Image: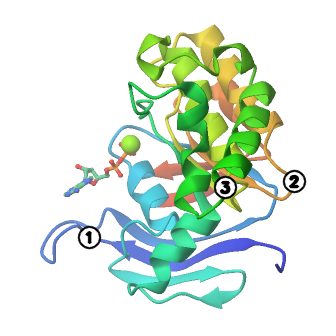
Amino acid sequence: MSIASLALRDVTHRYSESGPAVLSDVTLRIEASETVALMGPSGSGKTTLLTILGLLIAPSGGVIELDGARLPHGGSSLARIRAERFGWVFQTANALPRRTALDNAALGLLVRGETRAGAREAAAAALDAVGVAGLAQKEARQLSGGELQRVCIARALAARPSFILADEPTGQLDHATTLDVTAALLRNRPEGTAVILATHDAEVARQCDRLIRVIDGHVEEAAP
Ligand SMILES: Nc1ncnc2c1ncn2[C@@H]1O[C@H](COP(=O)(O)OP(=O)(O)O)[C@@H](O)[C@H]1O
Ligand SMILES: [Mg+2]
């Protein structure tokens, strides 16, 4: 595979035709291996930006380029690209409550068609990397918020996507756990994997290579 990159050019988004522009003329480029923090007030457009970067919604205008090639705004090829190239960590850990941590961490790979044995092996390694190997056989519903978020991070890491998108993944955790969980994500990412992380925590942003401020639908590069 060529070196990954993800770029937006003049991307604008409105949720309805007559509605306000939630993103205006957003141009940015993310390279393989980079870690990028998105910071901005609530309602400034961080989640919208992430969902466009992750190809979950099509922008109303502008261009998305993956590895330098322009993507269509819809169509069946996008589903495959989403599954193979992108991983997500959401604010509220979303795991199957009655499945084990190991099963949950293996899910991303199973969705991609990996064998059960291969998926379990990669999932076990990822759980180990983020410090919860000892919880592999516990059901997700038995875990604390911080533990569960580590399992979700392990699930994203195990699939070795090109881009991990994390939308305030530590929004529900205390500050110490936030820093721990963020480090688990950033330090254990596979070689080449970029992480784009929306956060309200300046200390989290300082752990990233880049900081992009999102203000009222506009983005500007800032010092992390
Ligand atoms: N599904 C939606 N439909 C209509 N408006 C939305 C939708 N999602 C978000 N918005 C609006 O878009 C703006 C940006 O929201 P969002 O991207 O969630 O910002 P942030 O993640 O920075 O809080 C807000 O004004 C919000 O109300
Ligand atoms: Mg948001």
Which label is found at residue 221? 3
Which residue occupies 60% across, 37% down? 105
User: Considering depth in this image, is 32 or 98 the residue closer to the camera?
Assistant: 98
Task: Tell which circle, 2 or 1, labels the residue nearer the N-terminal end.
Answer: 1
* Disc 1 residue crowd, few under 14, some 14–19, many 20+, Cα 10 Å: some
Residue 85 coordinates in the image, percent (x, y): 63, 66
Distance CA(mark 3)–CA(mark 1): 23 Å
Question: What is the spatial separation of the Cα atoms under label 2 and label 1, in whole angstroms?
Answer: 35 Å
Q: Is residue 105 above or below residue 222?
A: above
**Circle 2: residue type:** Glu
* Residue corresponding to mark 2: 191
Residue 14, which numbered label? 1
Furthest residue to the left?
18
Q: Is residue 47 left or right of residue 35?
A: left
* Left or right placement of residue 4 versus residue 57 in this view: right
Q: If you read the primary sequence from the N terminus, does the residue marked by circle 3 or circle 1 appear first? A: 1
Q: Looking at numbered disc 1 in the image, what kind of residue is underneath it?
A: Arg
How far from the left and from the top, in percent, is residue 108?
A: 56, 51
| Precedes in sequence: disc 2 or disc 3 | 2
Q: Residue at x 26, y 70 (%)?
A: 14
Identify the element where label 3 is drawn: strand
